[in-house]
Amino acid sequence: MIPYKIVRKDTDSVMAHILDDGNVEVHMPFDAPDQAAEDVVKLHLPNIEKQLAMRRKAIDTKTSINYSFHPLLFGKRYPIVKREGEFCEFNAKDGCFYVIPGLRQYQLKNFLKNLYTKIGNNVFSNQMQELSERMGVRYKHFQISQHTTPFGSCAARGELIELSWALAMTDKEFAESAIIHELAHTKYDDHYSPEFIAFVKAFCPDYDEINARAAEYEVMLRADGWILFGGKS
Ligand SMILES: [Zn+2]
């Protein structure tokens, strides 16, 4: 026999339940004899054992998944902490990403990508407005691109500026320099004219030094599996 707990309640039937944590309860009327619980468990024993085995396997899988990396957010790495609950989130106070136990690596990455996109849509769109006012330039549309790299692009002199969701992984100084770069394209199409360079550096004096981090970030994004070998994702 397997261990079970009797739960008496206002019911007409005697029913065995397998709980999420792998425990078994028999729910039965207040006036039913204890023997009734044993009879039900005995009668359904093969099925109950089968379900218990499946439940245990699910619990094992849930707790045994370990994630191979600490995701970046604004240039810092934070641990992933498994927590029972309904949703995944970044918790700034605790300094960690809370995720539901049992997420596969690809599900974890989907969650992170969605989170970075959401952050990009909030933080970067505000920054775009502030910086464009400071720089005295205009752009028409802004959106978060689906590409990991390049970090940004500017089409038709500000008709559409796109920033990569992956920019939320880079440090704030780097992200700001990338936005200044794209906003400068609303006036200058090139990368090498003295005018373009002077305009960018007027708002980001250390641009060369900050922009050099792009190569480091590409290496990090590859190591974390965000950029696949053989192509851009
Ligand atoms: Zn450019």
Image (cartoon, helix red, strand yellow):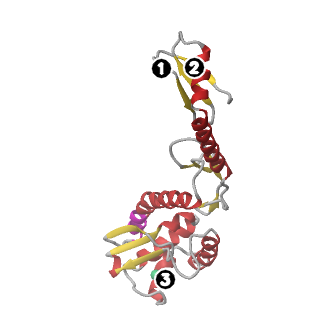
Q: How far apart are marks 2 and 1 (CA)?
A: 12 Å
Q: Distance between the residues labelled 2 and 3?
A: 77 Å
Residue density around tag 2, few if under 14, some if 14–19, many if 20 or more, within 10 Å: some
Residue 166 falls left or right of residue 139: right
Q: Is mark 3 on a helix, strand or loop?
A: helix
What residue type is disc 2 on? Val
Residue wearing tag 1:
13
Q: Is mark 1 on a helix, strand or loop?
A: loop
* Magenta-colored stretch includes residue 129: yes
Residue 29 falls left or right of residue 221: left
**Mark sitting on residue 198:** 3
Q: What x and y, as percent, mark residue 180? A: 46, 73
Q: Residue at x 57, y 33 (%)?
A: 18
Q: Is mark 2 on a helix, strand or loop?
A: strand
Q: What x and y, as percent, mark residue 105? A: 59, 60
Label the magenta part by its dominant secondary structure: helix
Q: Earlier in the sequence, mark 1 or mark 3?
A: 1
Q: Which residue is drawn at 61% across and 28% down?
A: 42
Decide if residue 100 is in sight here. yes
What residue type is disc 3 on? Ala
Q: Is residue 220 above or below residue 7?
A: below
Start-end of magenta stretch: 128-135
Q: In this view, does 168 lie above or below 229?
A: above
